[in-house]
Amino acid sequence: MGEKMVEREINWEWTDSAVEMIPFGLLTGFYGKKEIRITKLAEEGFCFRSAEKFCGLEKSFRFCFYDLRQSRYREIPVIPVAWRTEQKTEFFTSYAVAVQQEDYRKAVRALFCQYDRYIRLKLEEDDSDLAEQMTGYPAKEDDLFADSFQEQMVEWFGTECMEREEIKQERVKQAGKDSEILQSDANRTEPELALELDHPRAYTLFLQKSGEEFLEDYQERYPVFRDWLQGRNVNRFYIGNAFCHLLFPETEQLFALLEKAEKELLQVTFTFSYVREYQLVQTEKLLEKLSQWCRKENRKLEIEVNDWAMADMLKSDFPELIPCYGRLLNKRKKDPRMAYKKGNVKLLQENNLNAKFYLEYLEQEFGIRCFEWESCGYAQKFPEPAAGRSVEHHLHLPFYQMNTSQYCTLYAGSVFGDRGRQQLVTGCDRRCEWQTYLYPRHLDMVGRYNSLFGKDPEILMRTGIAPYDAEKTKEFCRENQVKRLVLPCWM
C-alpha cells in the first residue's frame, strides 16, 4: 500500500493533538531490534524519528509501557495499519504511524492517566507528599527529629536490638555450657573484629587510654555491641577517614598511634581518602615513611585505597603496604529511602566486583585482593574468587556512605549559614566532631563530616551481632566469605 493512498484513507488529525516527548522511563519503543525515540503518542497512533530512511514497515514494533502502580513494564506488540512521513531534516526523518489495536489504546489511556496524576502531584505537592502518594512514603513522619546527635545515637545503639531480659538469661545459661568450646574455637572459626577510628577525637582517646580502657568505654557508648564483644579480642584498628582528607591524623600523631598499636600487639589498617593534586607529593612521602617503619619492624600494613592515584603509588614502590579496595571505589546504589521504592532489589545486589575479569585485573595491575564493603540496607552478593585466586572481604557496619563532597556541605552551613555556599576546604577547625545534620527519625540517616550516612536497620540482626547469636555470625561470614567485621567509633 503506497504512502499517498494511505494518507487518503486514514485520518491523521490526531498528530496535532498527540502528547509529545513522553519520558524514556515511562515508554520505550523498538522497531525490530532497534530502539526508537517516540516523539508523539495518541490512542490512534504514534510518531517516531530515525536517522535511517524507512521505505516500508516490514518489521514489527514493540512498546514497553511502565505501570507506575505495579512498578514494572508491560510489553505490547504493535501492528501498524498505515504510516507517512511527517518531517525531513538533514539529520533525521520523523514518521507518523497509525494503530488500530484495542490493547494498545488501553495501555496508552492508562499511561496518560498515571502520567497526568504524577504531573499534577509534582506541581501541587512538595517532594514528601509526592513520594507519599506515589510510593507510600510516610510524609507525616518527616517532622519528627531527634533533639540532638547524642539522642539519635542513643536511639540507634542504646536500646535498639537489645535483648529482652528472659532471652538474655537463657543465652547466658546456654553459653555457660559450651564456653570452653567457644573460647578455644573463637580465633579459628570466627571473623576478625576491628574498630574504626576515623576522626581526631577518637585518635586522642585511643592514645590516652589503654586498650582495655578504650574497649570498656566503647561498650558503654555502644551497649548494643556489649554482649557480642564479651570474650572477644579486638585485634585490629582502622585509622583514618575514607571520606574526608582533612580528618586523617597528622604525621606525628599517626606514628604515635602506630607505635601504640605495635606495643599492644594490634594490627593496623590505614584508611586514606581521595588524594587531591596538591596532596600527591606529601602522600607519597608519607607512604615512604610508613614503608620504612615496616622494614624496621619487619611488619606489613594494610592501606585502604579510595583513589586510583594511591593505588598506582602502591603497586610497585611499597611492597610492605598491602592495598585494600576502598569504600569510595566499591560503589553501588545506597539510600535509606530506597525502602519505599517499588521493585526488586535483587537487581542491585551485584556491582562491578562481581565480574571475575575485573577481580583478575585488580590483582594483576594493583595487587588488590582485599575488599572493603559497607552494609547498605539490603543483601549484597559478595563475589567469589576466580579459579586459583583468593579474595578477602571486610564488612563495615551498620553505617553506609550515601554521598561525599570535597566541597563540604556541613562547613558551608555552619560557617556561612547556607548549605549552598560550598567551597573547597583546605583547612578547618574540624567542627564536624560536634556538629551534624539531623534527618527525620524514620530515615535512619545523618549528615556527618562531609558526607551523608545511612544506618542499615537489619544488618546487626542478619550478622548475629544484636541480638547476639554466635552461630548466625559464623554462618553469615562463611556464606559471604567475609573475613573481617568493622565497627564504627563515632564517639
Image (spheres, rainbow, N blue to C red):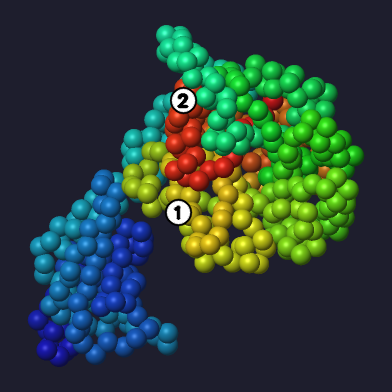
* Residue at the image point whose x is 53% and y is 19% from the top: 179
Per the rendering, the mark at residue 99 is none
Task: Report whether residue 436 is seen.
Answer: no
Indicate which label's residue lies in the foreground, 2 or 1. 2
**Kind of residue sitting beneath label 1:** Glu
Residue that carries the numbered disc 2 in the rendered image: 469
Task: Please state which of residues 475 and 126 is positioned toward the viewer in this rendering.
Answer: 475
Q: Position of residue 413 (x, y in %)?
A: 69, 36
Answer with mark 2 or mark 1, whichever residue precedes in sequence. Answer: 1
Question: Who's the residue at 44% across and 36% down the image?
Answer: 475
Locate the C terminus and report the quarter of the image it occupies.
top right
Which disc is residue 350 wearing? 1
Report the number of discs: 2
SS category of the residue bearing label 2: loop
Q: Which residue is drawn at 34% across and 86% down?
A: 52
Label 1 Cα crowd, 10 Å radius (few <14 / some 14-19 / many 20+): some
Residue at image location 35% in from the left, 80% down from the top: 50
Q: Is residue 335 placed above or below 86 in the rendered structure?
A: above
Q: Is residue 359 above or below residue 61?
A: above
Q: Is mark 1 on a helix, strand or loop?
A: loop
